[in-house]
Amino acid sequence: MILLIGGSSHVGKTLIAQKLLERTQFPYTSLDHLKMAFIRTKKTELTTEDDYEMRYFLWPFAAEMIKTAIENDQNMIVEGCYIPREWKQSFTPEYLSHIYCTFITMSEDYIRRNFDTIQKTENAIEHRMPDELDIERLIMCSKHFREDCAASQTPNIDITDKFDADALTEQIIKNAGL
């Protein structure tokens, strides 16, 4: 089984992937690591600021990793904000039968009420480079990912009340049929 965890920045994708690893024993790959490998080896001229372009640059590589894992009967979690709306088009129905994908977003109200907490917990798993977190950008990104999910018929978990990584992990396990 392949679990894809997509969604906007700062929603807890990496923390949830870590919790899924602990619960399922499935290894996980962060698309941020793949991104940095390409940037540091200068295999792309894209930078950490080029999120939209990076999504379409990275996805073919991620899709082939996923296919290889399926072909080898291996389980894997892939998380990151670089899973495109059209992700299903990379796979035949046979491959798709081995993939569960969900996106995680945050409602505008949740972001506005919890912005300080979002900032304080941004390094829960990864050590992020210091940057100025923009509340309006977070709101816009979550909105766009929700729209992508609706257009591609991909499940979306929208955080509206409180962030509970354990509950989100359980929800993903249940929805994936694990």
Image (cartoon, rainbow, N blue to C red):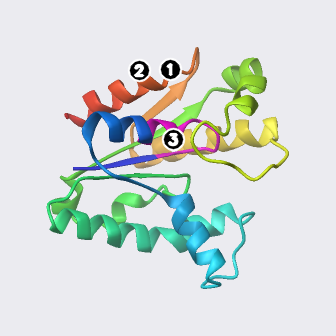
- The kind of residue on which mark 2 rests is Ala
Asked if the residue under mark 1 is in contact with the one under mark 2, i.e. CB atoms within 8 Å, the reply is yes
Q: Is mark 2 on a helix, strand or loop?
A: helix
Viewer-proximal residue among 28 and 84: 28
Q: Residue 167 carries which label?
A: 2
Q: In this view, does 80 lie above or below 176?
A: below
At horizontal 56% and vertical 73% (from top left) the residue drawn is: 37
Q: Is residue 111 left or right of residue 78?
A: right
Viewer-proximal residue among 116 and 97: 116
Residue found at the far top of this picture: 161
At horizontal 56% and vertical 21% (from top left) the residue drawn is: 163
Q: Is residue 156 above or below residue 96?
A: above
Q: Is 160 included in the stretch rendered in magenta?
A: no
How far apart are the alpha carbons under marks 2 and 1? 5 Å
Q: What element carries label 3?
A: helix
Dot 1 alpha-carbon crowd within 10 angstroms: few under 14, some 14 to 19, many 20 or more = few
Q: Which mark is residue 164?
A: 1
The magenta span reads 6-17
Q: Earlier in the sequence, mark 2 or mark 3?
A: 3
At horizontal 58% and vertical 19% (from top left) the residue drawn is: 160
**In the rendering, at what x and y percent does residue 71 appear?**
16, 68
Q: Earlier in the sequence, mark 1 or mark 3?
A: 3
Residue picked out by circle 3: 13
At horizontal 76% and vertical 26% (from top left) the residue drawn is: 115
- The kind of residue on which mark 3 rests is Lys
